[in-house]
Amino acid sequence: ARRKNLPADGARVVSDSDQGLTVQDLTIEQRGRTGSRRLVDDVTVRAQTGRITLVVGESGCGKSLIAAAATGLIPAGLNAPGTVTVAGHTFAVGDTKTWRRLRGHRVGLVPQSAIGSFTPVRTVGSQLRETVLRLHDDTSDPGAVLRALADPVELPRAALDLFPHELSGGLAQRAAIAAALAGKLTALVAEHGAAGVEPAAVVHHDMSATTSADPDGRRYWQERNRLWCAARHGSALGV
């Protein structure tokens, strides 16, 4: 049986065997009184099932806009022709009706500002529980689902009782990943906070993390392991 939240108005079935995420022929323009400015120029990104795909570039090159396109969150005022394919269904980047059915359920997002993605006046656990209930309306034990989300990303149970401002940066990121993994994902899109880091340095850490003994290498490898939790069941796109 086909899940009711997958086929959406405007979506076209291209292949039931294609379970990854593809952003095809993406161009993003900002239009003003004096003309238009191209922010992203004819980009195609494919994140294959079971693999992690990284988009690397200097600050301001459009990585966050590509992530926005891959999750249906293009800012207002921008024109973004292009298509997205998720779980074999192809639709326009700006198809908001389709995105309402897919975002969270089949495409998860880990934002660059993890703490900012949570409401400050509620505990992290209560917000994760609400996410579980919204995405799993058939579950009889949301607490069990919540624990199953927290454990793989090494989010301590005690952290669930804290407010977002009480979390360290690392714990906030783990909580954001747990929230993004709450759906039955085809793909996870994650923004990496690397402002001011040269692309070559990011690639170097990525390539050396498996063998490096320095603390930075270990931390980076742990982050990749948390993304791999999603990649085992779908695809992961890191920007």
Image (spheres, grey):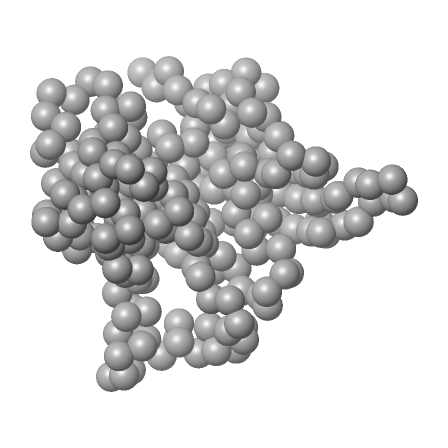
In the figure, is residue 200 to the left or right of 214? right
Query: Does residue 104 show up?
Result: yes
Outermost front residue: 121
Say above or below: 74 vs 239.
above
Q: Residue at x 80, y 40 (%)?
A: 31
Q: Residue at x 15, y 34 (%)?
A: 145
Query: How many numbered callouts?
Result: 0
Say above or below: 32 vs 96.
below
Of residues 224 and 109, the one nearer the viewer is 109
Of residues 178 and 95, the one nearer the viewer is 178
Q: Percent from the top left, x then y, of residue 47?
A: 47, 49
Q: Percent from the top left, x then y, of residue 86?
A: 47, 34
Q: Percent from the top left, x then y, of residue 83?
A: 62, 35
In the figure, is residue 65 to the left or right of 1? right
Outermost bottom residue: 213
Of residues 168 and 13, the one nearer the viewer is 168
Query: Does residue 50 show up?
Result: no
Say above or below: 88 vs 30.
above
Of residues 131 and 70, the one nearer the viewer is 131
Q: Quadrant of residue 105?
A: top left
Q: Percent from the top left, x then y, of residue 40?
A: 69, 51
In the figure, is residue 186 to the left or right of 33? left
Q: Residue at x 37, y 15 (%)?
A: 4
Q: Residue at x 38, y 43 (%)?
A: 117
Say above or below: 215 vs 226.
below
Quarter in which the N terminus is drawn: top left
Outermost right residue: 34
